Amino acid sequence: MNKIFTLVTVSALAASSFGSDAAADFSLASNPNGVWTYGWSSTLAGPLTLCGTTATLGPIIQWRGDMAADGNPSLFKNTTGSTIVSGTVTLSAFQLALHPGPNGEYSILRYTAAAAGLYSVSAGFIGQDATTTDVHVLLNGVSIYDNTVSGFGNSNAYAGTQSLLAGDTVDVRVGYGSNGSFFYDTTGVDFQVSAVPEPASLLALGLGAVALLRRRRA
């Protein structure tokens, strides 16, 4: 039992080093923030404009595009381990959310690859209000996934594998949908990008685990 547990633990620790989680990494310290950039655009395929101001609203931290008085388009996170209800918005524990702007602006969360390789990309979207948004995943400015979120708790998700070069970008973009209004459009986002280890890396990992087991026997 100890041998199996050691092997699984070593594998899990090594695999975790390959991943980036937008919610876990979300920070007001800088923009860009490592592999992540927080911004907005006036059109779906338009260039990203950096969010330039921040706000701390109790346990909620926010990057703002400031096209509306409330700071939208914006990106924000519940920093607590408990569900928060603010007005009509419900944010789950540590939930990251995007909100579009008043004139059709898209809120944008961008991942930029630091190195060439094969990456697993997952992006989940969920209504955190009476949400009616259009949601997208773009690779280097070209849409590879388009869907909608309609209503509280309604969800959709993208999952795929992409070959990226250093500097390539993967965006999550959230717009205000077909109703032409940005009110009540808070959309929860779960965005993760993980490098897929090459076979040689997996072999090295396995050999390292075997070596560890042998040392434990000794």
Image: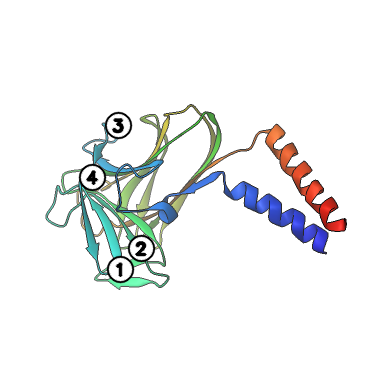
Residue 10 location in percent, x, y? Answer: 70, 52
From mark 3 to mark 2, how far is it between C-alphas?
A: 27 Å
Q: Earlier in the sequence, mark 4 or mark 2?
A: 4
- Label 1 sits on a secondary structure element that is loop
Q: Are marks 2 and 1 in contact (CB under 8 Å)?
A: no
Q: Which residue is mark 1?
A: 59
What residue lies at 22% left-to-right and 49% top-to-bottom? 73
Location of residue 168 (image quadrant)? top left
Location of residue 6 (image quadrant)? bottom right
Q: Which residue is mark 4?
A: 51
How dense is the environment of label 2, judged by Cα within 10 Å: few (below 14), some, or many (20 and up)? many
Residue type highlighted by circle 4? Cys
Q: Earlier in the sequence, mark 4 or mark 1?
A: 4
Residue most toward the front? 218
Front of the two marks 3 and 2: 3
- Picture quarter with the N terminus: bottom right
Q: Which residue is mark 3?
A: 45
- Label 2 sits on a secondary structure element that is loop
Q: Which circle marks residue 152 in the picture? A: 2
Front of the two marks 4 and 2: 4
